[in-house]
Image (cartoon, rainbow, N blue to C red):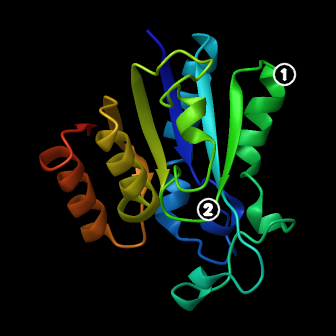
Amino acid sequence: MRKVLLVIDMQQDFVSEGGALSFPAAREIIPFIASKVREALDQGREVVFTLDTHKPGDAEFQKFPPHCLEGTPGHDLIPEFREILSAYGGTGRVYFVKKNRYSAFYGTELENLLGLTPGSNRDRVAEVELVGVCTNICCFFTAEELANRDVPVVAYAKGMATFDPEAHKFALEQMRSVLGIKVVE
């Protein structure tokens, strides 16, 4: 059974103090996600990190301040995860998907990476574990896309965060009640 851990946008601009869209709850989930990354790699499973990736003048900056500009420190994966990946070396089971929309599927290779495209040379993923930021934005819209593709998803509430605690709860409930995702508290 192919099970993949999908880590959404754990980048410096969202997580690290001083990041363009940083918020304290994002830092609180680091230990939980770090344990899930180690667990997946110890079990020989794949880990996919999405990287929110923008260029100057991106249309999204009409809604949010500039963030995750490619080539800047804010675009980088947070140091805690870079250290874990360094410790595991080149496992060949870690992938990075650059995205510039809320969904990790829009304009990316994620569908093929998960074996969901016809003729893919990869086995179809049997389950995706989902963690990261922001619960009600990129996590939610990626979860919706997984549900549309009939991929079983386990979303870890302790491994997700957003700016607004009420939006966090609402998004998790929508994942559970509308998308049919297993939400683990």
The amino acid type found where label 2 is placed reads: Val
Give the distance between the C-alpha atoms of the residues marked 2 and 1, in whole angstroms. 25 Å
What percent of the width, then of the height, locates residue 183?
A: 25, 39
Residue with the mark numbered 1: 90
Q: Residue 62: which quarter of the image?
A: bottom right
Mark found first going from the N terminus, 2 or 1: 2
Question: Which residue: 76% across, 72% down?
Answer: 69
Query: Of discs 2 and 1, which sits in the foreground?
Result: 1
Residue with the mark numbered 2: 15
Which residue is more in the foreground, 16 or 60? 60
Question: Which residue: 62% across, 11% down?
Answer: 44
Q: Which element type, helix, strand or loop, lies under badge 2?
A: helix
The amino acid type found where label 1 is placed reads: Gly
Q: Which element type, helix, strand or loop, lies under badge 1?
A: loop
Q: Is residue 84 above or below residue 165?
A: above
Question: Which residue: 48% across, 14% down?
Answer: 2
What percent of the width, then of the height, locates residue 98?
A: 69, 53
What percent of the width, then of the height, locates residue 29?
A: 49, 49
Is 106 placed left or right of 129 in the picture? right
User: Is the residue marked by circle 1 packed among few (<14), some (14-19), or many (20+) residues within 10 Å?
Assistant: few
What percent of the width, then of the height, locates residue 6?
A: 52, 37
Q: Residue 17: which quarter of the image?
A: bottom right
Is 130 placed left or right of 96 in the picture? left
Judged from this view, the residue extending furthest toward the bottom is 62
Q: Where's the N terminus, which quadrant?
A: top left
Mark 2 touching mark 1, by CB under 8 A? no
Q: Is residue 153 above or below residue 65?
A: above
Question: Which residue: 53% across, 15% down?
Answer: 123
User: Is the residue marked by circle 2 packed among few (<14), some (14-19), or many (20+) residues within 10 Å?
Assistant: many
- Determine which of the numbered discs, if any, sits on residue 33 in the image: none
Q: Where's the C terminus, which quadrant?
A: top left
Judged from this view, the residue extending furthest toward the left is 177
